[in-house]
Image: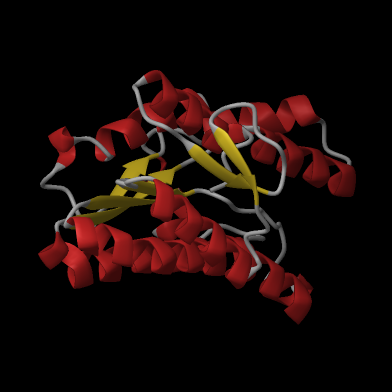
Amino acid sequence: TGGSSGIGLAIAQAFTTNGYHVCNLDIQPGLVGEYFECDMTDFTQVTDIVKSITAQRTVNTLICNAGIHVSATILDTPPELLDKVLDINVKGAYAATQAVLPHMQSNQDGVILYIASDQSVVGKTHSFAYNLSKHALASMAKTTALDFAKDNIRANALCPGTIDTPLYQNAIAAYCERSGADPADIHAEEAACQPLNRLGKAEEVASFALYLASPEASFITGSLQMMDGGYTTR
């Protein structure tokens, strides 16, 4: 899900290059894989599309990547904004997972990967709704892993830190517009926050996703895999 830009696009490219047939569910058209126009907030639409795919193909990997970012404290988050973040980031993943699990159970094989965040394990300022949603994805990975290990289905959360993507760029632009800060200064500060002194790349996340979906990672399930340049070790 969400394979038309940023981390999702990089993942779609990596999997396609390595022989996968990628089905991309996104509200925006995608250039890689077979595209399905899909509003991830629409439970019925997500369910119907996933079931139509599993009726035609053997699906061995689900990657729940679709999401939005909101910068706001709890006081600045009205109910409708919280609903929007949770509907896309959490309920979209819930719908896709629920739709694909019976198919994977039938095949006694499957990998589910949630693209979570370093905010699945730490708090950050002005990130109430987004942080809440990423903690939820981590929980989903753990409970799904335990409930369906008997069916040879693995579930993990890949937790990127600050990755240079359109989502990141838009968040910085919005912050600078509100605060009047210089974008160059903010980008430098973000890089300096990472022990490796740089931002991550979408292609690096994609490579890790490819590994977690592979047989080489067959003993990894229920885990939160940090990929944050060392940020959460501090």
Compared across the picture, whether 128 is left or right of 84 comes to left
Q: Position of residue 6 (x, y in %)?
A: 60, 33
Query: Which residue occupies 49% across, 24% down?
Result: 13
- Answer above or below: position of 74 versus 169: below
**Residue 137 coordinates in the image, percent (x, y):** 43, 63
Residue at the image point whose x is 81% and y is 45% from the top: 174
Q: Quadrant of residue 221?
A: bottom left
- Image mark count: 0
Q: Residue furthest top?
A: 17
Q: Is residue 96 left or right of residue 42?
A: left
What coloring was used for the rendering?
secondary structure
Residue 83, given in percent of the width and then of the height, sits at: 68, 75
Q: Is residue 115 visible?
A: no
Nearest to the observer: residue 148 or residue 81: 148
As drawn, 132 above or below 192 = below
Where's residue 198, x and y in %? 51, 24
| Image-based side of 113 in relation to 42, left or right | left
In the image shown, does 125 or 213 lie closer to the viewer? 213
Is 27 rendered above or below residue 227?
below
Establish if 14 lies above or below 3.
above
Q: Quadrant of residue 188?
A: top right
Q: Residue most toward the bottom? A: 79
Asked whether residue 110 appears in the rendered view, the answer is yes
Return the residue nearer the eye: 19 or 138.
Answer: 19
Q: Nearer the viewer, residue 90 or 12?
A: 12
